[in-house]
Image (spheres, grey):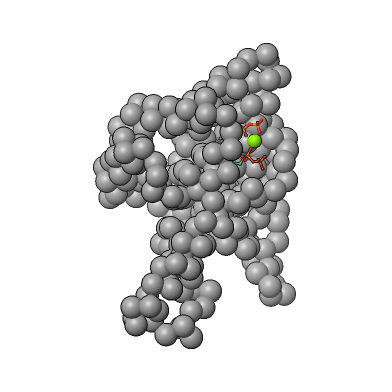
């Protein structure tokens, strides 16, 4: 990736920045519990961390930032917590969309929209529509997202094409399946960060993570900031990516 046209910033060499960083924003509940606060407060502070990280991503020259904001499995949480999380998404879009747009951020949403309340769907559509021509940073929000569900949906689309006589099953390869996922134009993540110490993907971007570098950090998401992002990027820069070959490729 070339950063030739990017403005200079303080901090690490921008050429170290991975093109696509994806983050599993975990630990809001534990952050709150450690302070004797309700889980909802952890989620609210998590949105503040998100704002910081979007800004830092601009500054560090990241082109794509994907964030895991609500998983298909998070429906198993108490209704009141689901209500809090949906409320925060609504507020985030209502309060922050104009400034994201001003900053040249293009918003994309991945995940299942069917079954979501119509006002949420309208907000998601509005965010994508308003920012569709922006080019500075693409913010991909994984909302009501599960990787297995995404892959199953791609399989359904392909099966439909076959049933309609538009596709020969022999044409289905990894590239074709990948092209039927939710955001096929977005490159695979170079770096996946998970906060709060858990070392698992929890059904996040499992197809796209085939050759992502994984960095697990112990801090809870509400405490994540630009320095923590820089340190994850520095760890990424030390990794050797070989993609199955023998020769190491430089980080991004
Ligand atoms: C991440 O924090 C936010 C979501 C999963 C929506 P958690 O709510 O999972 O926080 P912990 O893992 O319980 O601490
Ligand atoms: C993953 O975190 C989902 C999001 C960050 C939105 P979880 O907290 O739901 O994951 P598990 O349950 O610990 O695996
Ligand atoms: Mg969690």
Q: Is residue 23 visible?
A: no
Give above or below for 96 relative to 231: above
Residue 68, given in percent of the width and then of the height, sits at 53, 43
Quadrant for the C terminus in the image = bottom right
Instruction: Report the residue at 68% width, 13% height from top.
Output: 36
Horizontally, is 145 left or right of 138 in the view?
Answer: right
The residue nearer to you, when weighing 25 against 252, is 25
Residue 165, given in percent of the width and then of the height, sits at 34, 82
Residue 251, given in percent of the width and then of the height, sits at 62, 58
Q: Residue furthest top?
A: 36
The residue nearer to you, when weighing 109 against 237, is 109
Instruction: Report the residue at 44% width, 55% height from top.
Output: 4
Horizontally, is 70 left or right of 128 in the view?
Answer: right
Residue 205, given in percent of the width and then of the height, sits at 56, 55
Q: Which of the 4 image quarters holds residue 190? A: bottom right
Q: Is residue 200 visible?
A: yes
Instruction: Report the residue at 46% width, 54% height from top.
Output: 3
> Ligand 2: which quarter?
top right
Instruction: Report the residue at 52% width, 29% height from top.
Output: 79
């Amino acid at each position: 990736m070339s950063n030739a046209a990017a403005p200079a910033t303080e901090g690490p060499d921008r050429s170290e920045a991975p093109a696509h960083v994806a983050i599993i924003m975990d630990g809001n509940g534990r952050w709150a519990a450690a302070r004797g606060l309700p889980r909802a407060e952890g989620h609210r502070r998590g949105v503040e961390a998100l704002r910081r990280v979007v800004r830092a991503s601009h500054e560090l020259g990241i082109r794509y930032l994907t964030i895991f904001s609500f998983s298909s499995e998070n429906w198993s949480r108490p209704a009141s917590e689901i209500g809090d999380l949906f409320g925060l998404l609504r507020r985030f879009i209502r309060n922050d969309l104009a400034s994201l747009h001003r900053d040249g951020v293009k918003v994309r949403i991945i995940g299942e929209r069917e079954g979501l309340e119509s006002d949420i769907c309208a907000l998601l559509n509005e965010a994508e529509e308003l920012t569709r021509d922006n080019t500075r940073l693409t913010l991909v929000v994984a909302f009501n997202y599960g990787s297995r569900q995404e892959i199953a949906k791609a399989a359904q689309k392909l099966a439909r094409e076959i049933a309609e006589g538009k596709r020969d099953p022999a044409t289905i390869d990894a590239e074709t399946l990948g092209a039927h996922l939710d955001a096929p134009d977005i490159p695979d993540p170079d770096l996946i960060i998970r906060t709060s110490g858990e070392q698992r993907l929890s059904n996040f971007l499992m197809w796209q993570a085939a050759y992502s570098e994984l960095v697990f950090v112990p801090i809870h998401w509400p405490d994540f900031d630009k320095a923590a992002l820089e340190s994850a990027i520095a760890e990424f820069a030390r990794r050797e990516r070989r993609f199955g070959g023998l020769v190491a490729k430089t980080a991004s």
